Image: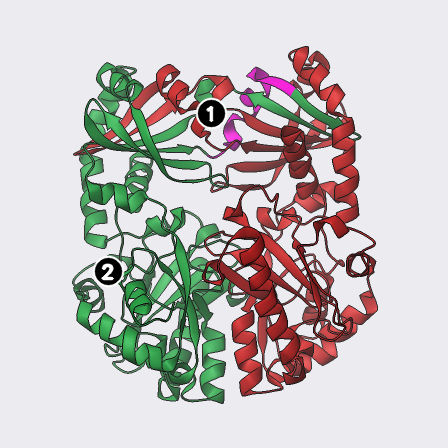
Chain colours: A green, B red
Amino acid sequence: MTLIWSKACFQTETIFDRSSGGGSDMANVAAKREISSAESEELSREAKRAKGDNKNGEESGNEPEWKNILSTFTTSSVLSDSAREKIMFLHGKIAGDEAVVVLEKTPIREDSLAELFKDSKLRLDMRNDIYSSYRLQAPPHLNEIKTTVVCPATEKHVKKYRRQESFLVEETGDDYRSITLPYVQQQSLSLQWVYNILEKKAEAERVVYDDPDPEVGFVLLPDLKWDQKQVDDLYLIAIARQKDIKSLRDLSSEHLPLLHNIFHKGKAAILERYNLPASKLRVYLHYQPSYYHLHVHFTKLGHDAPGCGVERAHLLADVIQNLQADPQFYRTRTLWFPLRADDGLLGRFKEAGRL
Amino acid sequence: MTLIWSKACFQTETIFDRSSGGGSDMANVAAKREISSAESEELSREAKRAKGDNKNGEESGNEPEWKNILSTFTTSSVLSDSAREKIMFLHGKIAGDEAVVVLEKTPIREDSLAELFKDSKLRLDMRNDIYSSYRLQAPPHLNEIKTTVVCPATEKHVKKYRRQESFLVEETGDDYRSITLPYVQQQSLSLQWVYNILEKKAEAERVVYDDPDPEVGFVLLPDLKWDQKQVDDLYLIAIARQKDIKSLRDLSSEHLPLLHNIFHKGKAAILERYNLPASKLRVYLHYQPSYYHLHVHFTKLGHDAPGCGVERAHLLADVIQNLQADPQFYRTRTLWFPLRADDGLLGRFKEAGRL
């Protein structure tokens, strides 16, 4: 079950986005890890149902049909890759059908180390004083490559996996009102999934903390990127109950009680539930956000969460300090953020001659 | 030569830090990638000299001596690992000697894809509609594990690789003057390598741009973490010529001409040399910095450079805006930053009851 679930996660994480369609994610592999709740649940159920098939597949050894299919895979292009994460996204064809193939090396497993050292071949590359380096050739079953296939793939799949360049955009307060705000309003994408969470119509069993106050209240729940198996990559989201705050840009000093409440009660709830003190947390907002309903990210310090870079994240403690010093700070200041090449908002900035 | 160099880089990147000893790096694998210039050059030369040995090693196939040594490696603990980066740092013993072994899966190579698909075995794990996932077992020579050995290793090596928890520290302006500044002054670690660069006594051939003005001048050069082979992970450092600016905390509006100069001429030099426009750059300062002489980081947007997280990085554009709004901004505001558990400065904050 655990194995199946982690596979379903990988698949859904890399296929779907949880957003209101702003598309302002960074153009990297990690950014592909946002997911729609409904889609996730559906796929999780599908994956569990597929468990029987899976077992059959394992018991019968290699599946000749699919073995043949991948051995005839012809690569037409590398859509994206990461040398750091040892992952590659390929576009090509399998027996005439469009296909996307994702290859990702598996993490090194502590429980197979003894066998790995015993049964591998080593070739010396360099030796210098107390330092030496080798290429180690491991038995194949100890060094697998996770392979995901989408076939037949649509143009949408191909576009989704293609590396998108990001551009840093400079947005003055006037730019926000004349370019960004009209764009966001025109998109008017559904926030129904957010309201479902706030009204306990969905994901109620996942809620970690709920403050029902209509002014300063919020719901705290694990982000779907976090599998909740270990606190090392802890990631929760606090969603404000107030519905009229689109983003950082709408905040003024009148929202300080709300921000203080989320900051303090969120940290307290995480300490109580996960035994993780505030000094181990990175608490921040995104600008641009993925969806235009105020929410705050809580991630573990030291976990390289997607979107925690200085170009998109704003520490909540700093936001509070800035609003205390200047009630209109976020309505008047210039803000910088990355937009992907295919983001409609980037087009608007270009049209306005601001890029 | 290229192969040898990349190996030497890996080795030195994971062994040495380029810093004045502040030790405020984040406790992650990436943070181990800072390097002392002198040590780097020395090791690079050593690695080149070792090339003959290397060839001999390759030609004679496996080295029985070392093969035996690693096959008898006994792991005493996992010092740190990253499932995302597929890397693991181990502490153990080889024939009675203390040893550190680093295992890192190699990036997927585009030039071996055809052979990989043709000669691998596939096992189906899950199939669901157009999505399916597999475990792929590749021929060992197409799926090697980079292995670095330090033996005999000292306690210092072991400590260096051990995962260090980070703690987020809150520093008011008063905390800076009563805790941080005295600590930094007491450490008074050598900045000779910085002065060598400014005076062209070292690394002169690496300089990308040099503005000799004593007030607003700076030297721009590639960071040692960047191998300069592709702009995807571009990383340069601008080092101010003024010697009396320790960090962000020393900046006031009088430094605006210097900051503007670094910002504009740095971006122009990168456009000219690397054809990378300013909209593809993330330009920022660290607080705490690794060494207390003002320097600015230029990294490619979309490259997940170590230390670009919101908890440590400050966009230069934002720093300029803040100083324009309040000349004493960075002398009076509260700043947050992570410190590793073994950082002496963290001890001072604890002693002062500030953590």
Query: Which class describes the residues within 10 Å of circle 2: few (<14), some (14-19), or many (20+)?
Result: some
Mark 2 and mark 1, same subunit?
yes
- From the viewer's perspective, tell me whether residue B1 is left or right of residue A304: right
Please tell me which residue is depicted at 61% across the width and 87% down the height of the picture. B327
**Residue B107 appears at what percent x and percent y?**
49, 33
- From the viewer's perspective, tell me whether residue B129 is left or right of residue A299: left
Subunit of mark 2? Answer: A
Subunit of mark 1? Answer: A
- Residue range corresponding to the magenta coloring: A107-123
Q: Is residue B224 above or below residue B140?
A: below
> Residue A21, labelled with which disc?
2
From the image, state whether disc 2 or disc 1 is nearer to you: 2
Q: Quadrant of the C terminus of chain B?
A: bottom right
Please tell me which residue is depicted at 70% across the width and 68% down the height of the picture. B294
* Residue B83 visible in the displayed image: yes
> Residue A143, labelled with which disc?
1
Q: Quadrant of residue B213?
A: bottom right
Residue A110 magenta: yes
Please tell me which residue is depicted at 63% across the width and 69% down the height of the picture. B262
Residue type pointed to by label 1: Asn
Residue A164 magenta: no
Please tell me which residue is depicted at 79% across the width and 39% down the height of the picture. B42
